[in-house]
Amino acid sequence: MQATAYTYDADSRSGSVLLDDGTPLPFDAAAFDAGGLRLLRVGQRVRIEVSGEGDERRVTFVTLQTF
């Protein structure tokens, strides 16, 4: 699934992404680390993996979108 980086805190390595429908989803340091990233800028397109349903939906993997 694709999304756009919406917020990012380099100290905690956590933040949120916006899905293409505008829905924000949070991610934690574990999801950031799973993608092997070192830096993320707000506005970057990312590829994500999500688990859970409804209000329990969370990002479990974040990496840069490559073409």
Image: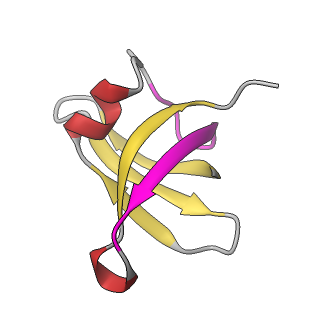
The colour scheme used to paint the residues is secondary structure
Q: Which residue sits at x=56%, y=61%?
A: 18
> In the figure, residue 11 lies in which quadrant?
top left
| Spot occupied by residue 12 in the image (x, y as percentages of width and height) | 17, 36
Please state if 24 lies on the left or on the right of 64 as rendered. Answer: left
Q: In the rendered picture of this protein, how many numbered marks are placed on residues?
A: 0
Q: Which residue sits at x=27%, y=76%?
A: 56
Q: Is residue 48 located in the magenta-colored stretch of the structure?
A: yes
Q: Which residue sits at x=33%, y=49%?
A: 15
Q: Which residue sits at x=60%, y=39%?
A: 46
| Spot occupied by residue 22 in the image (x, y as percentages of width and height) | 63, 73
Please state if 33 lies on the left or on the right of 67 as rendered. Answer: left
Q: Which residues are magenta?
A: 40-52
Hey, which residue is sitting farthest bottom in the picture?
A: 54
Image quarter (top left, top right, bottom left or bottom right) of the C terminus: top right
User: In the rendered view, would you say 21 is above or below 43?
Assistant: below
User: In the rendered view, would you say 22 is above or below 27?
Assistant: below
| Spot occupied by residue 7 in the image (x, y as percentages of width and height) | 42, 50
Question: Which residue is at the front of the view, 61 or 43?
Answer: 61
User: In the rendered view, would you say 67 is above or below 23?
Assistant: above
| Spot occupied by residue 34 in the image (x, y as percentages of width and height) | 33, 27
Please state if 67 lies on the left or on the right of 52 as rendered. Answer: right
> In the figure, residue 45 lies in which quadrant?
top right
Hey, which residue is sitting farthest right in the picture?
A: 67
> In the figure, residue 52 lies in which quadrant?
bottom left
Hey, which residue is sitting farthest front in the picture?
A: 52
